[in-house]
Amino acid sequence: EQSPVAIFTMMGTLAPYKQISMSAEDIFEYAGTTNINVCNVASQIPSVQHFVYIGADVNNIGIDPTKANQSYALWTNFWIGQYKAKLATEYCVMEKFGDKGIALRPGLIAGDERVEFMNHVYTFNRMPGYEQFKTYYKQLIPHLVSSAELATDALNFIRGGDVNAFHCQTHSKQAGIAAPVGVHRFVLHNTDNIVLAAITV
């Protein structure tokens, strides 16, 4: 019987419509505790030498954790459970695996999505024509990667590849993260206000 040498996990991604009906605590339990348990168990298996966590670039989606208890901060409160869950899981990976663990932090992920509706499973592509129009998609959407590219990065990490050559350029092994500039910076710093204004107009 072959023992595992690496563990991958990205459990806990919730569709926005599911988040509406769940509290931040429930979301943390679903998206954080589940992955933390996987990390803790994996760290106790001697053969597991690497751990790859596919999380999200939660520091660049307009969340301000200092506003988590403010009623007008609709965007922050909508995502705060995911924000805390992703960071807590990253902490576990770094604590248990050190240099042999990595958290990939993609923005949007291109690839097939499967949705169950009325006992039927429907498949659709999040980014139609991604391979043909990859350059244009990436110019429009920061930190966009495909599921296939994430899988390649995960395998390259396990094989000792160069983390600076990953498709997913936002990850826990970065020496430093360039701060957003221009319109991107303005939107990230004012997302709560923009969302509030949009729904009250």
Image (cartoon, helix red, strand yellow):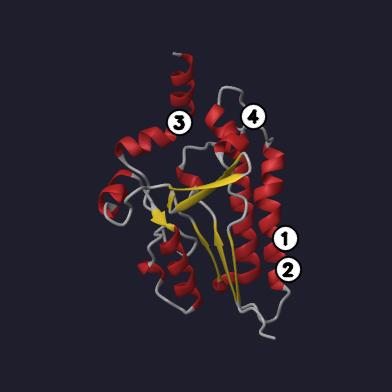
- Neighbours of disc 2 within 10 Å: few (<14), some (14-19), many (20+): few
Q: Check if mark 4's residue and mark 2's residue have beta carbons within 8 Å.
A: no
Question: Label 2 is placed on what type of residue?
Answer: Val
Query: What is the distance, in whole Å, between disc 1 and disc 4 at their CAs?
Result: 27 Å
Q: In screen coordinates, is 32 left or right of 106?
A: right
At horizontal 30% and vertical 43% (from top left) the residue drawn is: 140
Image quadrant assignment for residue 41: bottom right
Q: Which label lies toward us, 3 or 2?
A: 2
Q: Which residue is mark 3?
A: 191
Which of the image's four quarters has the N terminus?
Answer: bottom right
The amino acid at mark 3 is Thr
Q: Which mark is residue 41?
A: 2
Tell which circle, 1 or 4, labels the residue nearer the N-terminal end. Answer: 1
Q: Gap in Å between the C-alphas at discs 3 and 1? A: 32 Å
* Residue at which label 1 appears: 37
Give amino acid for label 4.
Asn
Q: Earlier in the sequence, mark 4 or mark 3?
A: 4
Closest to the camera, between mark 1 and mark 4, is 1
Q: Secondary structure at mark 2?
A: helix
Residue topped by disc 4: 69
> Is any atom of residue 46 visible in this view?
yes
